[in-house]
Image (cartoon, rainbow, N blue to C red):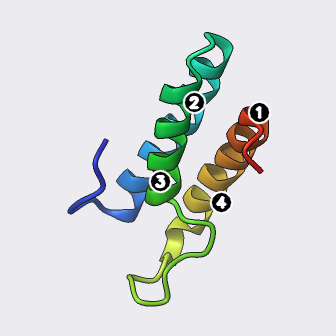
Amino acid sequence: MGGAGRTNSEAFASAEACAVLTMAQLRLGLKDEARDTLTQGNRLAPEVPSTQGPDLGDKWLDWLIARILLVEATDLAGTR
């Protein structure tokens, strides 16, 4: 699920998938894998959109959904 060359929309969809996968891995007791997946998701949809990168434009809702799922996964992982 690498982020190089992806559009915002693709990156945010991948971040959402990482969040869901993280939660599944946690339920299965795969804590190391979950931590790695969560890190990858956070790279794809950072907490604060880059001021250096492209404007979120109409993709702000995609970013927001990704962030909500990543926060939930982070809380479940107990890494806050």
Circle on res. 22: 2
Q: Residue at x 77, y 33 (%)?
A: 76
Pointer 2 or 3: first along the chain:
3
Which of the labelled discs sits on residue 56, or is there none? none
* Rendered-image quadrant of the N terminus: top left
Q: Report which residue position mark 1 lands on.
A: 76
In the displayed structure, would residue 15 be above or below residue 55? above
Mark 1 neighbour density, 10 Å: few (under 14) some (14–19) many (20 or more):
some
- The first of marks 4 and 3 along the sequence is 3
**Residue type (three-letter) at the residue carrying disc 2:** Thr
Which residue shows up at 42% across the image and 44% down it? 14
Q: CA distance from mark 2 to mark 3?
A: 15 Å
Dot 1 or dot 4: first in sequence order is: 4
Labels 3, 1: front one: 1
Whole-percent x, y for residue 11 in the image: 39, 54
Figure check: 54 above or below 27 = below
What amino acid type is highlighted by mark number 3? Phe
The answer to whether the residues at label 1 and label 2 have Cβ atoms under 8 Å apart is yes
- The residue carrying pointer 4 sits among few (fewer than 14), some (14 to 19) or many (20 or more) residues within 10 Å by Cα, namely some
Q: Residue at x 77, y 38 (%)?
A: 78
Q: CA distance from mark 4 to mark 2?
A: 18 Å
Left or right of 16 on screen, residue 5: left
Residue wearing tag 4: 64
Front one among 4 and 75 = 75
Q: Are marks 4 and 2 in contact (CB under 8 Å)?
A: no
Pinpoint residue 49: horizontal percent, then vertical percent.
54, 76
* Local secondary structure at mark 2: helix
Left or right, 40 with respect to 23, comes to left
Label 3: which residue? 12
